[in-house]
Amino acid sequence: MFKTSVALMHGIARWQHSATVRLPGVTQSSLQSNCVDHTAACGTSRKAIILPGRSIFGKSRVISPASGCSHHVAAAAVSNLEVTKDSTGKPVHNIVKILRDRGLLQEVSSPDLEKLATHTTFPVYCGFDPTADSLHLGNLLGIVVLRWFAICGHTPVALLGGATGRVGDPSGKSAERPILSEEHIEHNVQSIQTLLERLLAQSSHNDMPTPIFLNNLDWFGAMPLLTFLRQVGKYARVGSMLAKDSVRSRMDSESGISYTEFTYQLLQGYDFVHLQREHGCRVQIGGSDQWGNITAGTDLIRRLGSQDGREPPQCFGLTFPLLTSSDGKKWGKSEGGALWLSAEKLSPFKLYQYLLKNTTDQDVIRYLKVLTFLPLDKIDALQTDMQQQTYRPNTAQRLLAEEVIRFVHGEEGLSAALSATEMYVLAGTSTRSCNSPRCCHFGGHCRGCALCCPGQRPGG
């Protein structure tokens, strides 16, 4: 009987539970309007459907591919912002203000970047070293920031560290990384590039720049050591290199730092030089722990440009905060290890469950701002709603989980996660009345699920 029920619910869930949490202020008419825009831009003809009645997650649900489309959610997020024109007449949004308002800006090398970004567009890059065959939740911030740049008209460049991954970045590490085999590194590079292409390709609509994917082994692999020392090492100042936080912290540690790791900042610095010369990159972004490596690049551009007689353009570094919880701990680790973005290493269901059950009310609004593309006014309205007695607990967490899964794994991944979640809940169905305000069936029959009543045992 149970197997039959699960099979039946699995079939129902495939069409019924592709729902999204209704945001405060979102009406049926606005969903239908979005759907028309989605049909024109994305070539689909699915319409928003309002399902009345009660579900295990609320009183009504919205099935809306249009409202769920990341392209249109992001477009809505910048629609009310001040717009200027570039030299060709195209609209330009203030990307620095957007990142600052969403809590995605830690440091910027010069205030001139904000002035430049409101008048012109340019390529901007972020590097990803192949230390594993997938990126993890912490890496998602870099992808999100790249995509915000793309939304504002700047070309996103994802740089795979086929060369730097063979050296190892000492930033934030207490000991040297183990050396991976050549085959292992190449496998990791290919896997990460496939993942990045899928995530950043969501930005490649007609009105957004096409992402560029590069591998720094392409220019370092054929460069002899003597050439690198003469053309790059000559202009690096050892005093500045020693002053970097990543170097000083390791030099003071018991394990120390190897010459290989010490030179990492030079390699990353020359990446910026190469990308500026060959692809016109003006900005490098990275986590706050990358500030030393990023400024090594801007300094090297300035020194190399002045030495060969060419006046280099002003280039910039921009960092975003690391993903941490309100108590300052790095957020995004589960008991089983990293929260991978690849479905082969971590299922959409498990990532959904982690976001749902490990996000506190103190952190959820901040995570919605930095990990999703939802408009800030909608997030602010949800924050206000959380203070009301009528607020249904975990609504914000469910919204966060759905938006992250939709971006990382697409609509199919979200549907699979929601279907698995519904079966997980139904497996613990109880007929006991429950008066816990956290229960999704408050005042009704408690299912004793781990989603809202972790202290209740299924079927108790």
Image (spheres, rainbow, N blue to C red):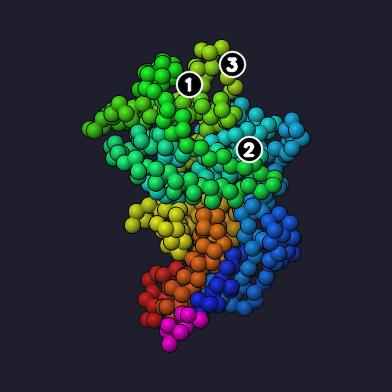
Residue position for label 3: 311
Residue 259 picture quarter:
top left
Residue that appears at 52% across and 45% down:
143
Q: Is residue 7 magenta?
A: yes
Residue that appears at 63% across and 47% down:
204
The residue nearer to you, when weighing 187 against 246, is 187
- Range of the magenta residues? 1-8
Q: Is residue 165 magenta?
A: no
State whether residue 91 appears in this view. Answer: yes
Q: Contact, CB < 8 Å: mark 3 with mark 1?
A: no
Mark 2: secondary structure: loop
Residue that appears at 64% across and 52% down:
71
Residue 117 picture quarter:
top right
- Labels in figure, total: 3
Q: Residues within 10 Å of mark 2 (few under 14, many from 20)?
A: many
Which SS does the magenta portion mostly show?
helix
User: Which quarter shows the N terminus?
Assistant: bottom left
The percent position of residue 321, horizontal first and vertical second, equals: 48, 41
Q: Amino acid at mark 1?
A: Leu
Mark 1: secondary structure: helix
Residue 300's disc number: 1
Q: Amino acid at mark 2?
A: His
Which residue is outermost to the bottom? Answer: 1
Q: Earlier in the sequence, mark 2 or mark 1?
A: 2
Q: Residues within 10 Å of mark 3 (few under 14, many from 20)?
A: few
Which residue is outermost to the right? Answer: 89
Q: CA distance from mark 3 to mark 1?
A: 13 Å
Residue position for label 2: 154
The percent position of residue 51, horizontal first and vertical second, equals: 64, 74
State whether residue 108 appears in this view. Answer: no
Question: On screen, 312 above or below 10?
Answer: above
